[in-house]
Amino acid sequence: MEILIQQLFNGLTIGSVYSLVALGLTLVYGILHIPNFAHGALYMMGGYITLMMMVNYGLHYWLAILFSVLTVGLIGVLMERLVFHPLRNAPPIHDKIAAIGILLFLEAFAQYVWGAEYKTMPSPYGQVVQLFGLTFTMQRLLIIVSAIVVMLLLYLFLKKTFTGATIIAMSQDRDGASLVGINTSRVAILTFLISGGLAAIASSLAAPINLVFPGMGHLVILKAFVIIILGGMGSIPGAIVGGYILGFSESLGATYISNDYKDIIAFILLVIILSIKPTGLFAKGGH
Amino acid sequence: MKILKRQYIILAMLLFAIFFPLVTQNEYLVHVMTLSFIWMIGVYGLNLLAGYTGYLSLAHAGFFAIGAYSLGLLTVKAQMNFWAAFVLALVITSVIGFLVGLLALRTKEHFFAIYTLCVGYIIYLVIDKWESLTEGVRGLIGIPAPGNIGPISFQTPLSQYYLVLSILLLSVLAMYRIIHSLTGRTYIAIRNSEDLAQAIGISTIKNKLTAFVLSTFFAGLSGALYASFIRFIGPDIGHTVITFDLLTYLLVGGIGTLSGPIVGTVLVVWISQQLQFLQDYRMLIFGPVLTLLVIFYPRGIVGAIASWTNKQAGRMKQRSLRDEKKEDSFPSSDIAPENQVKEG
């Protein structure tokens, strides 16, 4: 029983990270209908920038995260302006290849600047907490709480502010949004800014319990794709729910099935889903 | 006139390939060239699917690895005759390709890319983790060189060079025949508009499936040759990094062109050789190149040259037709089937 609760807690931790990454991915998909393969590279950059700020410049953990969020958001904006905007009318295969190009560049860049070795991120929250006779590390609790706060803020932003509403409007109907006077370019920039920021938060939160290395985004981004297909491409609640579903199935699978094959679970899940329903679960209409 | 010119170019390339090892006498260069020939075969497979049929498969390295591992396991562990194992490896890859294609091709566009990306990752993880069969990260060692065909043996690098070259030529010929046949036209029709293709009575699923299986066949062929040439394989050959490498070769050369894979592979492999000090950082250059190419020259070097010559030809024609209407412009659409595909 104790193992089960511990594993559920771990699932909640991993699920929070996955949800944040998937949210960024699904926002971009909703606006531009491109699967941003470079999103994993943004996640990786976020981890490295936070680490660099903490270790080289001695910034506090939260300040480092803030800096990282802004920088990665800016990288996202540059990506949109320089690459995806010029390609907006190109055949869909081009966006994907361009995104792969960015991914390869950013990974090589990280390896060039920070080296290929695995790095640990020191966290000021290494304490162990006792709750109801179970032990939790502070960092893991922090991940869960921060992720939920970020999701709530995002929800309020999208639902309660005018700018947020323009994002929703554009994801529902690009031409329609244009017709009612929404500046689609500005919304696209904003979306990439948020998407990059979410990736940076996710990696900065997860890095102290994992490691920082150039390939850290590979598995995460693939799983994020699984999640948004699970939850419906472009659907925001779907990304959150899907993230937690995957987090739980992985942590339980690792304990009760096989630790070696835990990374495969997500992909097998995806292959099964797409084999049965080629447009994903909960897909809205034709996309 | 133009056909004659193209024939000369092909002849020159062929002569160059045949005499290359005799001229250089440098074993290392011959090794690099053989390896690029092997990659070219794989790139042709990718080209058929991504370039002509419009389906970007990111599992290509997985099928490459299946071909390589099938050959390796059949010769090393099952002690089979080399050529029997070679043929069987191709059959295994194609059958797996058929099964994957059956499911993968139910999806479209982005879903297809993501699906195949995941399939590729599953193949990689299975090879990496199934240690009792594949030896995991230790890799397979001692794969034999190609067996003798009659009196010809393939033990020396030079003979392997010519073996790979001849298989490459056969592959190019096969590709040429496919692209210029009705089947090839069907693939292009599917790429340009799947709905339209369906409306004029093309069975899209059947054609997509044959394109997919053919594509995996060439990936497997390339993988099997790689295994017998390098004679050591590890799980890394199935990693998505290899898929991205193949994609780079294809894009630099020209996606959806017949000569693109050759041009792109030779160019990128040789530039990589020159930039060897960069090693792992070569993607610092090739990553942006990939992105810029897609934005500015979506059909690579070959496509750019083709549209340039088209423009020149257009100008000539315009001059001679000066009396006629001035708007005799030549659309250089980048997805329309270009004039390489001739009528009849």
Image (cartoon, coloured by chain):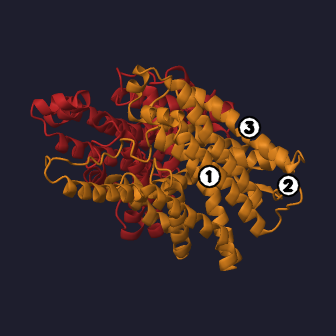
Chain colours: A red, B orange
What chain is tagged by disc 1? B
Task: Say yes or no: labels 2 and 1 on the same chain.
Answer: yes
Q: What's the mark number on residue B284?
A: none
Circle 3 residue: B92
Q: Position of residue A187 (x, y in %)?
A: 20, 41
Classed neighbour count for the residue bearing mark 2: other residues with Cα under 10 Å, few (<14), some (14–19), many (≥20): few
Which residue appears at 18% of the width and 30% of the height?
A175
Distance Cα–Cα, label 1 vs label 3: 18 Å
Three-letter amino acid code of the residue under disc 1: Ile
The chain to which mark 3 is attached is: B
Q: Nearer the viewer, residue A146 or A52?
A: A52
Q: Residue at x 52, y 46 (%)?
A: B47
Q: Position of residue B274 (x, y in %)?
A: 53, 75
Q: Nearer the viewer, residue A148 or B216?
A: B216
In terms of image quadrants, where is residue A157?
top left
Mark 1 secondary-structure assignment: helix
Q: Which residue is identified by label 1? A: B41
Callout 3: few (<14), some (14-19), or many (20+) C-alpha neighbours within 10 Å? some
- Give the chain of mark 2: B
For the residue pair B284 and B85, the one nearer the viewer reads as: B85
Q: Which residue is mark 2?
A: B149
A54, B343: nearer the viewer: B343
